[in-house]
Structures are given as C-alpha cells and as structure tokens.
Image: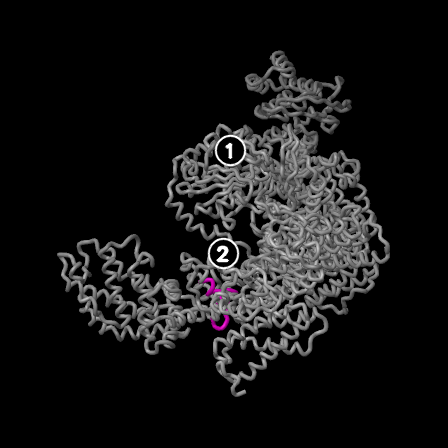
Amino acid sequence: QSDAYLGSDTEMCHQSQTIVEVVMLTSLCSPRVEVVQTALKCLQQVCDELDIKGSMEDVSDMPVNSNLVTYRDLGDLARAMPPGRVAQQKKIMHLLRHMAEPTPGNTQAWEDTFSQWQAATSVLCSNSKEPESAGDTMIQRVKQRQTQSPPLVSQLELQTQLVEWLHMTGFLCALGGLLIPRERTSSSLSRVTDRHRHESDQLYSDLHVSSRPKRSSSRPTSLPDFNSLLSSVEASEQKRAVALTSNPLIMKFVHEVVGLLVCSSDTFGLEIRENVRDLLGHDLHPAFYPIVYQEIRDRVYGFAASTGQVIVNDMNTLFVEQVLSIGKMMMETKLDSAAEYLQFANLETTVMALARYARSLDKSHKSLVVKFKFCQMVDAILRRRGELTFKHEIRFRNKLVEYVSDWVMVSNGRDQGIDYGTDCVMRDVDLASVRTLANLLEGLPLHPEETESDLAEEKSKLFLKHFTLLTNLSADCPEDSNGSIVRADTLSYSATLSRHITAVRQHAITAVANLLNANIETGLVHALGLAYNEDAQTRATFMEVLTTILKQGTEFGTLSETVLTDRYERMVDIVLTEEDGQMPILLTLFDAVPPSQLDELIRVVLDVVESRDLLAKFAEPILVEEVEHTESVQTLFRGNSLASKVVAGAFKLFASGFLYTVVKPIIEPIIERQSDRSRLGFEVDPSRVAFNEDVEVNKKNLIQLAQRVFDAIVDASRSLPIQVHIVCHCLHKAVGGVYPGSELNAVCSAFFLRFINPALVLPGSYGLSQGEVNRSSKRALVLLSKLLQNLANHVEFKKEQFMFDFNDFLSANSHNSHMLAKYLATLPSKQSITIEGMVETDGDVVFVKETDKLLLHELLWSQQESIKNDLFRVNRKLGKRLYEPLATLLAQLGQPDSRLLRRRGLERTLTRLDAVSSPLEEYLVTTGTDIDQEQLDELKKLKIFYRDGKSKSGNPVCYYVARKFKPDFEHQNELLLYHILSILKSLIRRPWELIIDLTELRRENAPKVEYLSRLLRIIPLSKAENLAALYVYNCNTWARKYFRHCDRLLSKAKGNKKVMFLDSLQKLHEFIDPSDLRLPTSTASYEETTRVFTLASKLSSRSVPTTIKVCSQSFQMIVNEKVRVLGQSVSIVDSYHISELEEATVQDGNTLSLKTTDGMPTMKFTSPDAGELLGALNHSYSRWLLSQTGKTAARKTIRPGDVPGTLLNMALLNLGSPDPSLRLAAYNLLCTLTTHFQLQIERELTEAQGVCIPGNNTIFIKTISSLLATNEPHLTLEFLEESITGFQSSDGSLKSLCLEFIAPWLPSLARFISKEQPDDQRAGKVKRILEKLILLTVDEKESHMYPSIQAHVWGTIGQVPELLDPLLIIFLKTSAGGGLGSDKVDVIADTTVSLATSNKQLVSSKVVKKLLKLIGRTWNSPTRFLEQHILWEEAAILVRFLLMLSFNDRLDVVHNLPHLFHVVTLLSCIGPVFVRASVHGLVCNVIHSLCTRAGELQLTESTVRALKVKLSMLSQPKFHLWFGISKVKSSAAAAFQPSYDDRTVRAVRSPPRDESEGVVLQHIESISSFLYETVQLCVHDMVECSWIVQWRQLVDRAMYHNNPPLQPRALVTYGVLAEQEDGETVLRLLTTLVESMVRFDDEVVLVKAVLMCLTHVVVVLPKDSHYTPILFWVAVCCLQLGEEGVFAASLALMEATVQTMDANGAFDKQTVESCLMGARQLYEWSFSQLDRTTGISFTTSFDYALASLLMKGLFHQSPLTATRTVNVLRLMVSISGKSYRQKKDDVIAENLPYFALLFPKCDQSRFLLSCVPGSKVQTGRNRTSRNYSNCTIPIFVTAGTPDDEVERSHLPLLVNKKVATDQTSQFLLLFLLVQLLLHTANDKEVEHLLYALADAAKLLNAAFLSTYEYQSDTMTISNSTCYLVCLFRFSL
C-alpha cells in the first residue's frame, strides 16, 4: 500500500485511467447483463484503488476523482442489482445524471457512444418509409447512408441491437448534460456598466459552438483496443478546453434524437418513437432542456409555409403530439436541478408555436388528442410556474386563454352522428380545456394585445368575451348525451357522462371565479347581471362563482374610485423595495434605460425617494459603490457615472432656489455689463488679456468676486434644504469607509464640482440667465469656478503660473471651506430647520407628482424585459419574488399613454417647425377657429389617423385605419381632414411613412372625394417628397372601386415606387420591425388563421382561384390572380368579421354560397373542401355567438363598500327560488358572505353541499333580513339599490319575496340624511333609491304587485318622518317628468295616500306646506297666468295629491282646513278641466271629512245637517259654474279621467279662457263666501278654534305680493274674511290700488280685486273712521276712469260705502253733498284735476256730476252692472232727501238727477206709481249696441215703459220749475235726458223721453234753447236724434 502511489503521477497512468473510464462507461450500454455487471464491478475496483491512494495529493488531482461518489454508487449497484433489465438501466441512468464534472474519460465515452448510436440508428431505421415532413433531415441522411452499405442482419440481431440502441440513447441523454456549460451568473447586485443587452432569443448563443473534426460514423460493438483508445484520449486532452465550452455533437444529438420522434420504420418505428419520447421526457439530463425546446421550436416553425400558412399533415401532427407528451413529462419530472435549467428554456415561443399548430387542426380524432395533450402540458407548466421564467407571462397566458377557449364546445358545435370514440375524446378535450382555462385565469389580469381605444374599455370587452363564454359554458352542460350514439352499456355511460358534466361545470365555475377575482374592477359590474338571469342553472352557477371568489379572499379595493392612484402608489412602493440595503428594481432600471433618459429618470427617482423619506437609503449604496471603484479621492465624481448624476441631480432638484437667491444677484451684473464700457475685467492670463486691461486689476476683481460668492454661499448655507445635508452626509460616510480623513474634502469638492460651478459655467441651464452669455462673461465665470473648485479641493495652483497669485486667497478661506463642508455633512435636527420655501412634513405623507408617476410607468413598461433579465441573472428566486408583483401591476395598469409625456416636447418641436406650404398653414389657422374641440377629441379617440412607432429606416410612421371612419354628420369629414393635417404638420419637413389599412373597408367608410381633393390641394402628391413610403395594406373590392372613382385625383400615384400594395404582415415586416408595428389588433388578428383553404375558386364571369382563411372571429378571401390598381399588380383581399356573415350554405357538395351584410351580391365558391369550409365558418360563428354578452352588460359603477349589500341581496333573493340547486347555492353564498365580511347575525349559518332547503322559506329569509337590517344598517344603501334591480329582474313569486325582505331596511334610510350636510353623497344615494322605488311603482301599476308595493314599501316609508321632505321633492320631479294628467302622476298620488296611511298628520302637513311654499315661489318670477309659470305643473300635481289624500280625512282636516281653503281660493278656475274638477272635488271631500269627523270635532246635529246641505249644494250647476266646470256632468269623473288635451303640458300652459278674469273674481268671491260660511258653522260649535284667524293670516301674506294670477284672488278672499278692520288695512289696500293704477293697462284685474276687497272692508270699519267717505271718492275716481272692467266693482264699493255711512247716521243731519264733499276737501286739488280731465265738476253740482257717472252703468254690457246701477240710483234717491225729512220717493232738487236716470228704466217702481197713479206698465227686453265713450258697448236694457194710455199730464213732474228752480239745474236735467235719448235703443223709452223733452221745451224754454245750442254742434244724425231735431223745431 505504501508503494501504491508509485507511477500515479505519470502521463501513462492518467491515460490508462481515462481509457478504463471510457471502457467502463461505454460497457454500461451493453445488452448483456453480465457485461454490465462486469463494468460495474470494475468501477468498484477503480474506486477501491482510489481509496487506497486517497492520501496522496497527486492522486487527488486525477480527473476521475471528481466523480468518485457517482462511481462508488455505480459500483455498489453491482452488489444489489434491481430486478429486471429496465429497472437496472433506469437506476444506472439516474446515477449517471448525478455525474458532477466532465472529465476526458466520460467525455470520450459519450462521444464514442454517440458514434455507435448513429450507426445503430441507421440500421434500425433502414426500412423506414419515405418521410412526409421536409424537416426530417436526419432520417433522410440515415437512409442515404444505408443505401451506400446496407448491413445484413437477422431479426434477432436487430432486436438485440434495438435494446443496445435504447441503452445508448438513455446513456447519451443522461450523461450528455456534463458536456453542456452552465450559465454564468453574477453574485451581487452591482451595477452593470455594459448597456448592450442580448435578446432572449440569444440567451443560449453560447451553446452553439464551432465545428469539430468528425469521428467515425460506425464502431464495432466489441471493446476497443488500447492503442485506438489512447489516440482518442490524446485528441480529447488537446480539445478538452473547447469541449467544456462548446460541443457540436450535443447539438447534433439533440437534432437527431428529436427527429426520431416521428420515426417511420416498419419494424421498430413505434418502439423507437415511444422509447425516445419516454427517454426525452423522463431520463434526459435537465441541462438538455433549453436545447431541446429550441430544437422543438425551430422544427414547429418549419411547419409553416412562406405565406405563413401552417402545413398540417400526419407526420407533423405526430411530431406535435410526441412533443406535447415530452413537455408534460419534463414539467412533471422530479430530477434535481430541473428547475434551474427550465428557467433558461424559451417556453413561451415554443408553446405558442405548438398552440398555433394545434389551433389549425380539424375535429378529427388525432387532432382532438393533440389538443387534449396540449392542455395537459399547459397544466403541467402552470403547476410549475413558480420555478419557471417567462419573458412576458401576462401576455403569454392571455394568448393561451384565447386559444384554448376556442376548443371548448360541450354541446355547442357537436356534429350529429359522431362515433362513440370521437365523442369521448371530445368530452375529454372539453374537460381538459376548461381545466386549463381555470388554471390560466388564476391571478391573471386581462391584457389586450394592443388597445385600439381606451384601455379600460378594451379590458371590459375582453372580460365580457371570456366571462360570457365561460358562463354560457357552465350553463350549457347537457343533462343528456347525444342520442344518436349507440352504446352497449347505457347505464355505465350515463354515470360517466354525469361525472364528466359535473367536472366540466365545476372547472368552468372555477375559471369564472378566477377570471372575476383577478379582474374584479373590470368584471364585477358586468357579472352582477347573472344573478338575475332567466336560467336558474346560470344563476346557480354565478352564485357558486361568487362563493368561490369570496373564499379565495378577493380584495374589492380595486373597485375604488382611486384605484389608479392606488396602483401608482403601489408601483412606487414596488420600485423602492429594499433587499439587503439596496433597491434592486431601481438599480436595474438605471442600467436598462438609454443614456438620453437617464437624467430624467434620476430626477423622477429623487422625487419618489424623497416622498417616501428614503433619500439616504437610496443614495448611500450608490455613493459607496462609486467610492469603492474610485482609484483616489481626488478623482471622485470626475466621471459621468451614475453617482455623479445622482449627486448633481439632487443638488439641482432640491437646492435650485438657493442658487437663484444667493448666486444670481452676484453674477447677474457681470453677465449684463460685460458688453458695456463700464464692465470689470476678470481675465488673468497675460496671453489673453485685452490691450486696455490691467492684469493686476483683473486679479483683484476676480478675488473680490470669488470672495463675494464664497462668503454669500457660506452665509446662506443655513438656508440649504435638508436634502442637501442628507446627500452630503451619505457622501461623508461613504468616503470615510474607504479614505479616512478625506471626508470633508470630498464633500466640499462634490458640492462645488456638481452644483455651484456647473451653475456658474452654464447659468442658463440653472435659470440664472436668459439667452446666451457672451464670451467675456463666460470666461469670467469659468475663472471664478476654477478658483472656487481649488478652494473646495484644498489644492493650490501649481501648473498655471498666472494663477499662483490666488494661492493666498485659497489659504485665507481654507478654514471657512472646511467649516462649510463640516456643516453640509451634518444632519440638522428638524427644530433647527428654518428654510424659506421648504415644506416641513413632520411625518405627513408627501405624494409623488402625477407626471413623475406617468414617466416612471412608461420607463418601467418599456424596460420591463431588461429589468427581469437583470433580476433573474443575479438571483433567480429573489428576482422572481421582486419581478412578479411588478409584472402583474404593469399588466393591470396597461400600456402608458406616452402622448401625455411627449406633449411638451412635441409642442416645442412644433413651434420650431414652419409649414411647408402656405396652404397647409392657412388651412390650419382658418379652420382651427371653427373646430369643436370636444368633437375633435372624440375623433382622436377613434384612432382613425395616428402617428406611432418608426420604420426600419428610422422614419416616423403614420396610420390611417379606413374602417374606423364612419361619419355621422357632414362636419365630421372636415374634422378628420383637420386632424390629419395637424399631425402631418410636424412631419412634413422630414422623411415619414404612411400605412393605409383598408381591412374591412366598406362603402360608408370611404371619405368623400371632395375632401380627398382638398387634402391633395393642400399637400399635393407631387410635392410630398418627404413621404418616403406609402403602404396600402389589404386592398379590397371596395377600395379598388374607390380608387377607380378617384382615378384623376390619384394620377400622380400611378406607377410611383413609393406606393406599395401589401397583403400580409410578413411583407410589411420587411419595412417595419414587428416590435414597432402599430396596426390595430383586429387587423393583425387576420394573420392568426385557424384554417386555410387554398383549393377554392370564386365563380363570377369565370372561375378565379381564391384562398379562403378562417380565423377565430373573421374570415378572409384572397384572390390569387392579381389585378391592376393605380398601375400596380395587386392581390384583392376581402376581409369580413364573422358577424357580417348573413348566410352560408353548401350546394351540390362542393359549391359554397356566402351572403354578407355589406351589400355585396351572394358570392359562390367551388372547392373540394366546401363542407369543411362551411364547418369552419359555422364554428367561428358559433364561438362568436357564445361570447356575446346578452344580459350581462355592465350596469352601474360599483365601489368596494357596495359589494356586501349587493351580494347579500342576491343571496336572499335567490334563496327563495323554486330551483333547489339555486337555493342551495344562494344559501352557501349567504354563509360565505357572513363569514367574509363578518356580518353580525344571531343565527348560525353553516355552508354545506347536501342541505335540502324547502321552497317555502320566506319566513327564514325575512328573519335573516330583519336581523341584518338591525345589526348591519351601514349596508342599507347598497342592499336596497341592488334589491330594486333584483325586483325588476324577477318574476312574480320572487318579487313578493323581495318586497318582504327589503321592508326592514327601509327605515334605515333616515340615518343617511344629514341635516347639516344636505348635499352629502349618502343623501344623494338615498334620493336615488327613492327615485328608483317611485319608478318601480309606476312600472308595476298594471301588475298584481301594485298593492303589495304600496303596502310594504310606501307604508313603511311613511312611518319615517325624515324621508318625507326629500320624497316629496322626488315625487314632484318624477311627476313633472311624466306630465300633468299622466298615469305617473296618479300612481305617485296613490303612493302619497299610502304614505299618509301610516302618518296622515305628518304627510298631509308636508304636502300642504309644500304646495303653499311652491305657490309662494311664484312671487319671485310672476307671470300673467299661473298656467304659464314654470312651477305650475308641480302645483297642479300637488293639487292632485291633495285630492287623493282628501278622502277619508287623510288630509287631517282639523289641522289643515285653513290651508286647504286658502289653496282652493287661490287655485279655483285655473288650469285644465280636470285640475278645476280636482279643486272642486277637494272641497267636496273636505266638507265630507267634516261630516264624518263630527264627533271628534264636537259638532251639533244642526251643524252637521247644515254641512250636509252645503255638501249637496256643491253639486248644483251654480257651483260648477263657480269652479269653472259648468260643462262637466260629474266633477268626480272629470277629476279622475283627464282628456287627451289635459295630458299635454303645452295645452296646460296655454289654457283656453271661457270667462274673463273679472268674472272669475266674482266666482272666487262666491266660493270664498261659501267656504267662510262653512267654517263659521263649525267654529260656532268648536271651542277655541282659530281656523278663521289662520286663514286670514295666510291670505294676508299673499295679498300684498306682486303676483298677477294670485294676488287678486287673495285680495277678494281677504275682503270676504274681513272682520273689524282698521284704517291701517285700508291704507295698505289703497297703497296697493295706487300701485296697480300705475300699471293700469296690465293690472285692471288687480284694481277690481282691490275695489272688491274694499267693498267688504268698508262695512266693518269703525263708525268714526275717516276712511269711509274717502272710499266713496275712491269709487268715484274709479268710475271716472271709464274702464268697464272695474265699473261694477266701483259701483259696489260706492253702494257699500253709502249704505255704511247711512247706517252709521252720517246723512241724518247733513246732506249727502255736504257730508261727502266735506271729506273731499283735503284732496280737492287731486280730485279737481281728475274732474277737469273727465269734464265733470262735483263742485258745481254734486248730484248731477254723480248722476252723469252713474248713467254709464245703465248702458253697461253686463246686466248685473246695469241692475247694480239702478240700485245705486235708488239708494241715492232714498237718502238724498233724508236730511230734509222728505219721503224717500219724493222728487226734490237733490234727487232729481237720479229720478231722471231712473225715469226711462223704471220697472213698476214707486217712482212711476207716484208720478202716474193707476198707470199700467209693460215690460220688454231689447238688445242693441251704442257708441258710448268712443267704444261700442253692448247694452242689455230692461225697461218698464208706460202704455199709450198713460196721461202725459203727469210726466211734467220731472221738468217742474218748482223742483229745478235755477237755469243751471234745468240745463243739467235736460242734458241728462238728451244723453239718455242718445244712448237708448228701446223705442218705447225713446218715445217716453221725447214726450218728456217736449214738455220741457214748453215749461223750460230758456234752458231748452241752451241745451239745443250746445247739443246741435256735437249731435250726430240717427234714428233717435231725428225725433229730437223735429221736436226742437216744432217747439220753437
């Protein structure tokens, strides 16, 4: 043993060991067991030998010693061989894979075995069939080799050789990993200086090595001789270094062994394929994985033709099937270090290549097996996702979801009559696909490939597509199988089918839950509608989905309105994640960004870290690394390193204000004065000084300047922000660790080098100057910075002699420089920080700027691949942990809108660019002023024309997507033209390129020719020299027609080489890199074809070869024969979305007819594959239909707080479903809800799958709802909102249940109404809920649910007083929306009754007060008619409410009677008939309520009888006339059945007026009197009743407001209610009268109303009131106005005044004239003015003046006025002689004028009886018209005229001189008689007057002559005057 080591160090010994190792290893492949055992024993002997020599150092260096552990295990295997040859070989392969290091021996053994394997492969595959795939080059080569020297072997030898071949294959697979070099990785997070990154496709470029000399292709199976082995070992030794880093045999082996997966040998083909598959899947060394995946990808890529079409054949399909099995095995392997190598495998591209091939397969059995295995492989990949590395995992999984979802069919798309085996495989594919979808969607945020519009909208569309597909799938699982399939064991199959359906459904539910969970913010609003789907199975599915996502712990915070802000904050947190004191993501981002963006990134990062108070933690590692890599402290920050940029950026960002306030005032004069003669010199270099300058003076100037600057900096250093101290402190700490003692020098040097001096040298960059600095100033600042920098460095000048004199300055300020550095490096306490302008946070959060977040988002998005590679290269586990949250967040945020960030730079660019031609500039200027910016913004969102990306030539590219232009109006063409030219303006002066996308172009998308012509005039093609290329993509039939139509305009484009027609993306990629291409996703999707049919021909005038592509949701027809378009040969490509397919049929077996919706005629194609083509189209169409949203469209926006209440309602509602499965699912959801949201419920709810819930569980649901309403009132708003939605979406039984369980929640609405904050958001929600409840009630009016709604909902709400005010507002708003008289108003009125049922006093008072308040608001903007007011509709609606409430005393008459009667007097006779009838009905119901509540009011029986009489009187025609419903038979019918005209708002606002306002006032007076009498009846019996007082108060508030329609009514009503009034009331009324007189033309009605009021008031004035006689003169003045509208009211006031004065005894001692004229004296001047105006003098003759005024009333158009005039005349006759103690009918001088007026009008009065005793009088009636006071007045005369028998001797009593004693009286009397004659139409009266005048001519001759002379000048000739003229002449 002591001599065992002898010779061990010789070369011969090493070679011998290598030979032994080669022989032993190659012998392990022998098919003979004894050979293998011998080899294992020999290995054991070698190990024993090494153990003996183990103590020798030289021996330990022997190569074989590195794998000693593995060899010892192999040797031990010889002692205990596993039973069975296969097991033995498996164990050997397992041990070989654990080989630690490559050695010359094992390398040579592998190479020799590979040579033998190649030879054996050629023998075993000798009788293979001709391969069908062009990719099987290995088999072709083997066949060629076989033809050269075919071996002659027996079948037994072949079988033995097959076993050995299998052993060799396993040996090569297991041991080959040693020959593959491992990836080198860095061990720290040090900053990478090399910025050039390799693409992921070059990740394994080091595996491709240079070629080696070929070894012999065949070797004998026996052991090699020693000499040959020795020569091989020598060669191996020489190539050892190369072999360890590069081995082409490895690549060759992988290429050939992968090719054997489709070996087609007749003898051993199947065995070879299966064994190779198993070996590659189970026994392959993990180091092979990246190479194998690369080989598979290359081969699958080779399955595509040059056109991009996938070549599908049996050989390719077999290869894909084998590969899928291998991929699954690799992912499931438990081999050591498998995960380590899988991370380098390019899985994404390989899997996508396989998916593309699988997608192109048909529905054959083999194709289904491939899809099934593909799903299995994807599942295996996802199970191992945590150990794998993906380039773009989110996009990768999204794409797989799209592909795999296309394979799920279940019952849809199943062909009838398929065989049993295919049906089973189909179901397996369904199950596998759904399971894979569930796995893919777990935690997957949806990510559209390219957003054509808003990102959120695109995500929403994508979610709807997947969500609808999966939910339809779960509901579409058939209960019974296809009946056309005959099975032997029906019972067994049914059980299997049932299990299959259950599994598919469960996986579908999981998939939907995962989809919803990961995209809750996008999908929840779309998904909620499924809770009310008509199909119970779908609803149950959705209940289970909700239960699942709650169990998964879904966070609903992403539903918040601030989700975007929260995500940006989360992005910042992720970027700033710390690991071992560093920020890995941030550091890798610095490495990834291009240098041009680094400064901006540093600025953003500094802002970000400062906002998180992490500036020190960020800066310190960077500074430490910089210091450690610096050769000396003097060179610190001299380079343009990251640390230098960070320090400079921090100083500039945080302390720029310091420069502006400290440095700028000092250097600003230098910059401004250096061009003046008075400038100071600073040049100190004698060789550069000017001739007129003194160097010494300049030195002093420079020293003074430097001293000023330095002193200012030192003095102001206290104002430096704390961030500067933090950076300097970190620098001080970093330098101290490497260069102790140099800390302060480094700090001071960096402060000046990276902050002060750059600002001095470049003042414009720091905002210290404007414009350029001249040369002398710049030189001065450079010298200043030099001086300051040396001072900071503490270094004297030694090289430049002219600077030596400044060393004294440096020495003098050295101490101050040292102290400055010390202060800068010290962190001040917060208490000592008094920095002007500094924001002191005191712990508050400082948020990052939005612009910084956007820029950081864009940089992270663009560099995420580089970030990922760097993180994974350093530490895979750490990188995965850091990167995955970032990748998920970036996917959720989506691609940033770079336009926001480029806008500033782009605008600056635009300002520097001039227009190419004046037409463009002129057009933009002139048109821009007329452009609607909102419409332009909407057009931009469509992305019809946009600029994005660049071409391979580096030119910017613009895109025009023709199909997106669908002009809705003419101006949109102009908008598009302006938008295009606005973008082209910035490109027109440099090369640019344009892509016109004509995909799916239709007639309506083509722009008008006139606008194309304008575009070409502004930018002609002949002058667009900078347009480098114009690509026309997918020219179709419509485009060809359009180009023909514009042939003349586009003549310049014909034959132009810049114009290129392209029909595929591959051709477009020749000019634009795929990563820079920005075509819409819908356009690029046509390249992802599922089936291609090339043998089709289009039938037209002739047969044209056509290729038809069928995509997932579209199809394309490409004409193979090219046509001429714009002088070029073009392929016509007609593209259609699958929804445009109107009809597709197959005729005669091979003729396909297609009808589309674009207006094209039916297209016919012939193809031998017509049936398959139709099937492919039907498949795409069915998939599209399955993904349609239906009823799952988005509803309202939902927030996190809405979720519990919303889901709770869904659970309770569906818990009452008739379907037992749905009830169970809803119950489980309820259980999960209470657990997830910790709802307080006293009952125990336990989730279970087997619980049997009865259908009648209403009490249980209501109890649960009541408990939750009590314990969780904060859920009320969301719960009720969702309950309304659920009610509207449910049927009858569930609607009743819904009403039951929402009732307990309604009272809680009151807690959300804040009196302090009425506009609170929660109060707004309450109002929305009430609005929805009202609309729900209106919608259900005709249904059987209407009474239940009124009882459960509104009866409950009526008990909540706080809700009534907002509710009434909503009632009015909703009613007004429906229109007055609509059903909506009646429903809401009914609802008001329901409210009053629970609380009539409160509801009635609210309604009444609301109406009165509304009426009061009309005062603010009065109108002439109330119906014209904007508030009229609301007022009329409230009247309807009052009518509904008035029955059965819902109006609470006791408390509201005065208000109700006030409303009646204000609103009677207004509006349409049904409103008037409503007011009349309201009065009836109120009096009816008084009768029914007589006991409560303590009314006597007599009072009740009187009330009943009045109630019956209301039905009389007279009362109908008063209320304006005289034409209505039944007021009740009119009130509840409005006519069609009444329902229209316009008819209401312009109502017909059947009577004048004056007549209406008389009706109001009558109504008021009637109501007043009613009140008096009740008040008489009631104790302390204040109804009348309250009523008067209400009227008093209304009568003095200027409101034309209502003020007169209030005045009239006040007069009726007047009791014991004083002078103040009269004064206010007279003031109102005067104001109305000012506006007399518009206020006639108001004047009349005041007079009517005064008529009542004068009666109740005190006896001694001085206003009583004044009111007489007020009446006289109104009579003098001559306005017939106020005549009757004036007469009434006069009559009332005179009667009141007479009753008060005013005329007992004084004559009427003296009494009334005495009251006139104070106002004589005013009255005399009016007398002169009217021509009447009361001072001359009071009686005749008054009589002349009253005479007008005798001829008034109203008979009532004429009658009242007669009454006044009689009154004056009776009281005129009262002071003389005369009989009241005696004729005296004072009453003679009144007798004269009564003379022709007397109707059997005492007057005629006294004048003509025993005379007989006849009554007659005549109508005529007379001209009176210059207007035609209808006169209704009722006169009593004496017969002819009347003795004329009695008539002269009128003209008796004893009565009319003086000539003036006689003249006035005759004048009255003449006027009567002129205006009297009755012949009898005329005759009577003529006789009287004839007597007067005899008896009063002088007066008669005077009268004749006065009248003859003004008299007109008429029938009456002719008699008078004749009489005058006869008398004379």
Tell me the element at label 2. Answer: helix
Residue 993 makes an appearance in the image: yes
The answer to which of 109 and 774 lies nearer the viewer is 109
Of labels 1 and 2, earlier in sequence is 2
Magenta residues span 573-590
Structure colour scheme: one colour
Q: Residue furthest bottom?
A: 2
Q: Position of residue 1128 (x, y in %)?
A: 51, 33
Q: Quadrant of the N terminus?
A: bottom right
Tell me the crowding category of disc 2: few under 14, some 14 to 19, or many 20 or more residues within 10 angstroms, Cα based: some
Q: Position of residue 942 (x, y in %)?
A: 55, 44
- Residue 1749 figure quarter: top right
Tell me the element at label 1. Answer: strand
Compared to 685, does 1623 lie above or below? Answer: above
Residue 1204 makes an appearance in the image: no
Q: Which mark is residue 862?
A: 2
- What residue is rendered at 19% in x and 59% in y? 680
The answer to which of 1550 and 1067 lies nearer the viewer is 1067
Compared to 133, does 1781 lie above or below? Answer: above
Discs 1/2, front: 1
Residue underneath mark 1: 1128
Compared to 177, does 1801 lie above or below? Answer: above
- Residue 1686 figure quarter: top right
Viewed as shown, does residue 1103 lie left or right of 914? Answer: right
- What residue is rendered at 65% in x and 52% in y? 403
- Residue 1137 figure quarter: top right
Residue 1818 part of the magenta segment = no
The amino acid type found where label 2 is placed reads Ser
The amino acid type found where label 1 is placed reads Gln
Viewed as shown, does residue 1540 lie left or right of 1018? Answer: right
Residue 584 part of the magenta segment = yes
